Image: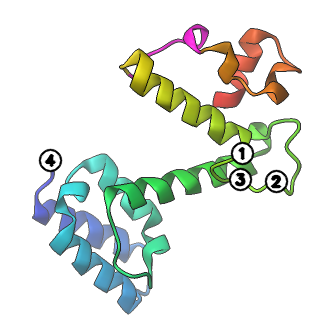
Amino acid sequence: MLTRDQIETYLDNAISKKGSVPESLLKLRDYVLDNELDVLSRPVQLKMFCSVMQKFYGRELMFNRYELYKIFIYEFVKREGKKNSRRISSQSNDTIVGFSDIRTIFMQNIAWWLFTVKKENRFTAEEIPESFIPVEVRANNSLEGALKEPAG
């Protein structure tokens, strides 16, 4: 767990890399330092926050662990969906990547399976239930290839 001083230093360093600093960003910084040390005291979550903090600019100061993960994961999925190497063959260029595209549904199924069935975060590709693999991926690949494709 990071201390308040460590969090403040990390935030200040992240903010200084952004160049000119809008007032709303400074307000957000002060708000999270006063109210969200529990979330930001974890190094991974602090890094996540700094990578998406611009998404919180100008919003009501509603910040919590759920919002952080929601925004971070959404931005991650969007970024991955833009990569040609990550595009699923049936996915057109105008597909909206979000929480209902086939890659994200696959990842949600894996996460829920890990949480409810596996109950640990270690697994091999062969352990993944075949039913989790999107039809669009199964149709064009061997089982081994299909298991590797959705996870990218």
Assign a secondary structure to mark 3: loop
Q: Are marks 1 and 2 in contact (CB under 8 Å)?
A: yes
- Residue type at mark 3? Val
If the image is split into quadrants, where does the C terminus sit?
A: top right
- Residue at figure coordinates x 43%, y 17% from the top left: 117
Q: Is residue 121 left or right of residue 145?
A: left
Q: Position of residue 115 (x, y in %)?
A: 40, 27
**Sequence-earlier tag: 1 or 2:** 2
Return the residue at label 4. 1
- Residue at figure coordinates x 88%, y 38% from the top left: 90
Q: Residues within 10 Å of mark 1 (few under 14, many from 20)?
A: some
Q: Is residue 145 left or right of residue 7?
A: right
Q: Residues within 10 Å of mark 4 (few under 14, many from 20)?
A: few
Q: Position of residue 15 (x, y in %)?
A: 36, 74
- Residue type at mark 2? Thr
Position above or below: 91 against 137: below
**Sequence-earlier tag: 4 or 2:** 4
Assign a secondary structure to mark 1: loop
Foreground residue among 57 and 2: 57
Return the residue at label 1. 101
Return the residue at label 3. 97
- Residue at figure coordinates x 59%, y 13% from the top left: 125
Farthest residue in the bottom direction?
A: 23
State the extent of the magenta-drawn residues as a range. Answer: 121-128
Q: Are marks 2 and 3 in contact (CB under 8 Å)?
A: yes
- Residue at figure coordinates x 41%, y 72% from the top left: 17
Assign a secondary structure to mark 4: loop
Position above or below: 24 against 29: below
Question: How far apart are labels 3 and 1 at the CA level?
Answer: 6 Å
**Label ID, residue 95:** 2
Question: How far apart are labels 2 and 3 at the CA level?
Answer: 6 Å
Q: Are marks 3 and 1 in contact (CB under 8 Å)?
A: yes
